[in-house]
Image: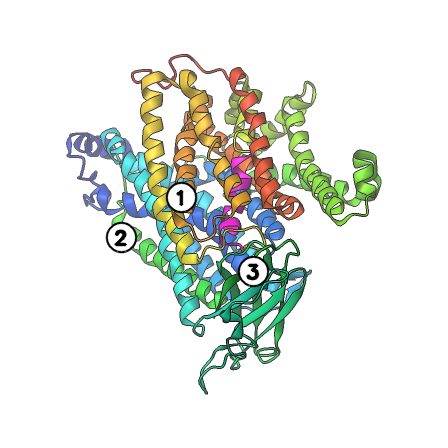
Amino acid sequence: MTQDKNAPAQAAADEAPINIGELDRDGRRISPWAWVPSVNFLQGMQYILVTQMFIIVFFTMGVPNRTALFWLGLLSLPWTIKPLWGPLVDKYWTKRNWTTSMQFMVGICLLGAAFTVLMPDVLILGLPAFFIISILVLFAVAFASATHDIACDGYYMLALNERQQAFFVGIRSTAFRVGWIFTLGPLVFMADVVQRWTGPPPIDVAIVALAPGQQANLLADMPVTITTPSGEQGIIVDTQALRVDAGTSATLAIRLAQDPGPDSKITVVLKERIKVPEVSLDETVLSFTHENWDQPKYIHAKVDPRLRNSATAMFRISAGNVALGWAVVLLTAGGIYFLLALYHRFMMPRAFADSVETTNRPPFWVPAVAVAATVLVPFLLGYTVYRVMMAYQPELGPLLFRGLAASTEAVDKKLYDFLYKLMSILTPTLAGFVLFFAPGLKKMTRSFFRSMSDFSRIGFADVFETFFAKEKIAIVLSFILLYRLGEIPLSSLKSPFLLGSVESGGMNMSLSEFAFANSIIYVIALIVGGLLSGWLISTFGLKRIIWILVAFMHLPNLGYLYMAYTQPIGNLVIINALVGFEAFGYGIGLSAFLMVMIMAAKGPYRTAHYALCTGFMALGVMIPQMPSGFIQEAIGYQHFFLLVMVLVIPGCLLIPFLPIDASFGKKGHAAT
């Protein structure tokens, strides 16, 4: 019966114009233009929200980089393991229902996250309560997003014929990137606007650095104590111009003019407008609440004794409700998800091909338990190895790192702690490779997957067994894991670096400046790079030009190394140019990476095998991102970007061993 209905509908769709949809179960013809762009817009939004925007959220709310990046890196886990529950999405609901339901779920989570960022400053297990609850909410977003990816990709192939799929593939990619632009552009800019709107007018403060034997300029004679009109909120500073002799320090006292209210937190930020390298502040971010608004907080300004000529550094002191700004952003994002999810319930056609076969289907709990076991057993084994490594650090640390572990120097201690934690994170991954590929052990591991597959009664073992039996699959998977080993730490720390203060080694950008650079500039350059790489690969083939693509992927890292050492503060032309160059190189270099995954997915189960490759790609994001914050705090931005350059080497060393056919990727070459 189903085939009789499908046949005329499909025949009509094949003959219909591209802009007209297939006749659906309700007798409607809905144009793909009505839903393809909006669905993929949300797909781009939700991924960037989790992986990029919340790095900015946590950074501006004072969460240390090492903590934020560790947990945000772990959030890549759902994208890593999503192929495991793909069969559940296929067999237990229509792709249309999964897609819209996951959009509603993401909307609910974002609305919840909007309220969590407004929570009072309460510590749980040594971490802010809002951070812990936000991470739990983001895990739900990540699982919903990964499920949404499976469902909407499958729906796209079921609801459109081949001609339409080919026509709209570029529209999908563009809509995904528009979601990216909107998230890192207008939404971040909105947070900045709300923060400025909720704060008093900014104040400029001068730090006059006096070289030995030289006089102060007239700016140092400005009146002390900045006041605000009665009844208005403001920032009160004990002096607008501070004179500091070389080799000494002086203090600025800052407080608010009014009580911000019992449920508000005002964040005061000092950003350098005129840079003097010899002048530094010990703090640049202060927080005031209902309890401490009238209690001065002190910032120490220090002048390097090597100062040779007197100079004046200018700082702008601005304030605003940072948490409220992000709450408004998350409420807006959640509202967009709800509205578009509701829209998609009506405007996504009920395609005939999007059906579920219920014959001989086991109850949902049976495959759900099998999939959960398949996910949880390796995860718990890996986590156990990690906890054992951490528990035995006093015994293993001195044995493995010897003098570094015994050092009493603060820098050495930070480096040792980081190296041991990194080793503890990598050890479970290496153990997993041994279990999957070592003779003797791999038989036991694959037997476990087969037994779980048989128990599930939906079968997923064949997909895994045929995947891991491919030619040189260990080398290919190693390449997928290592190719972005340098790029991921850089992209993870890029936001804190560009937004960070001069004293922390950052570029001191405002949220508005950051939003422009990392939305408009970044995405335009990314699209241009992607288009160029597509032409190069189709013209010359992947094998012939892969080294050129790899060079473009990694050489832009030198731009961040240059900024870390020179700190061209306020020079937006240079900063935007280097951010654009990074995006351009990423657009070119990522194409080589994606083509290798397409190559690895050739043969039977192509869709499922490509999903496995994307899972390993997500693992290759998770592993280097988790310790990135520890690295940066241990060695600083300058050495961090040097390390990034070194980390590109392991992936490059594997390129000569990849089984790439000479004609693979060329126009007219058919992959099988």
Q: Is residue 219 above or below residue 664?
A: below
Q: Is mark 3 on a helix, strand or loop?
A: loop
Q: Main secondary structure of the magenta part?
A: helix
Q: Where is residue 486 in the image (x, y as percent from the top left)?
A: 55, 35
Of helix, strand and loop, which one carries label 2?
A: helix
Q: How crowded is mark 3: few (under 14 residues within 10 Å), some or many (20 or more)?
A: some
Q: In what element is the residue under mark 1?
A: loop
The structure residue drawn at horizontal position 48% and vertical position 38%, both measured from the top left corner, is 559
Determine whether label 1 and label 3 are within 8 Å by CB: no
Identify the residue at the far front of this view: 213
User: Residue 230, image x and y in percent?
Assistant: 46, 87
Query: Residue at the location (55% across, 26% down)?
Result: 651
User: In the figure, residue 278 lies in which quadrant?
Assistant: bottom right
Q: Which of marks 1 and 3 is in front?
A: 3
Question: Is the C-beta separation of discs 2 and 1 under 8 Å?
Answer: no
On screen, residue 242 above or below 20 = below
Magenta part of the chain = 486-500
Gap in angstroms between the C-alphas marked 1 and 3: 72 Å
Given the image, on which type of amino acid does mark 2 rest?
A: Phe
Question: How many angstroms separate mark 2 from mark 1 (CA)?
Answer: 17 Å
Read off the residue under disc 3.
310
Instruction: Read off the residue under disc 2.
Output: 346
